[in-house]
Amino acid sequence: MKPLTLLFSPANRTLWIAGAASFFASALANAPASLGAAIATRNAPLLEISGAKGTIWRGQIKDVVYNRILIGDVAWRLDPLGLLTGRLVADATSEGGALNAKGRVSISPTTIEIRNATALFNLSAIRQYTFFGARYQGSARLAAKSLALSKTGCRAEGASVSTDALDTLAKQWSGAALPLAGDVGCDGGKLNLTLAGKGEDGAVRIEVSVAPDLAYTMTFMAEPRRDEVSRTLRLFGFEGDGDRLSWRAVGQLKGLSS
């Protein structure tokens, strides 16, 4: 009986806690992926998932739709070392829909972080909104060495964005494309994104700032060199003198935390 008494002694309490934690972590990780899909859709009303296969440890959810946008098939593989730090860490990919992406995702109770990530989003998949009266077109690209978002702020390293969203519209006006590119950074706890481009008929700069509570501001600045372009922009609400016009919007992002 003595060996059994020693096994259950207070001195081995840490060992028992670690063993229990490992057991429950293993049981959760090997639960079916459909369980995770059910939990996700229950907590996010705008999210739809047609099916799932594999386990929470390594699985895939099919035909993911968010806010009526087909994201695609999302697959992941958990890193067991992340569980030891109280985080869910996974190498994830998305393909077959509007989003083609890959990277390492880390989720804790307060922070979501992506590392070594690349993403290409098909803007034409956005059908319920318009951009200055026109449907979204083209694509947007994101590359980030590290990008972390939390309820108190953000952190960015080596993050950049680019898009050809204005190419079709610019070609209608001048016959030339107008690609935009810029950086993603954090300042004062806010996520800041800048896109800028210049062509023969002028320059465009877009600045977006998003606070931790999802309040946002967006400023669109244009320097058209043709009078007809300037007149068209004023019809959309742009203001300013000469060839320097601007348009600003403020609001609250919705649906991301619902």
Image (tube, grey):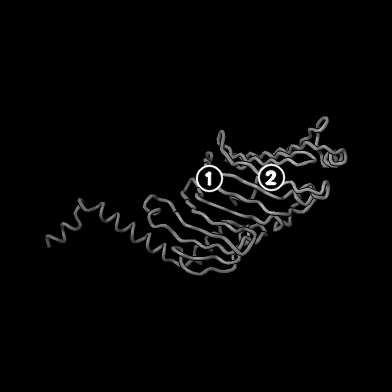
Image side of residue 180 versus residue 2, left or right: right
Q: Residues within 10 Å of mark 1 (few under 14, many from 20)?
A: many
Question: Where is residue 105 drawn, in percent x and y?
Answer: 49, 53
Instruction: Give the side of residue 236 with respect to residue 70, left or right.
Output: right
- Residue drawn where x is 44% and y is 63% of the image: 57
Q: Secondary structure at mark 2?
A: strand
Instruction: Report the side of 33 relative to 70 (left or right).
Output: left
Q: Amino acid at mark 2?
A: Leu
Q: Which residue is mark 1?
A: 147
Residue at image position (75%, 48%) is 177
Frontmost residue, 23 versus 235: 235
> Which image quarter is the N terminus in?
bottom left
In the rendering, at what x and y percent does residue 110 appear? 48, 45
Residue 124 in picture, x, y percent from top left = 72, 57
Q: Residue extending furthest top?
A: 241
Residue that badge 2 annotates: 180
Query: Visible in this render: residue 250?
Result: no
Q: SS for tag 1?
A: strand
Query: For the residues marked 1 and 2, what is the alpha-carbon distance in whole angstroms?
Result: 21 Å
* Residue 235, quarter of the rendered image: top right
Q: What's under tag 1, amino acid-wise?
A: Leu
Residue plotted at (54% across, 56% down): 102
The reply to whether residue 184 is visible in this rendering is yes
Q: Are marks 1 and 2 in contact (CB under 8 Å)?
A: no
* For marks 1 and 2 on the same chain, the one whose residue lies earlier in the sequence: 1
Which sits in the foreground, 132 or 110?
132
- Where is 135 relative to 154, above or below? below
> Marks 1 and 2: which is nearer the front?
2
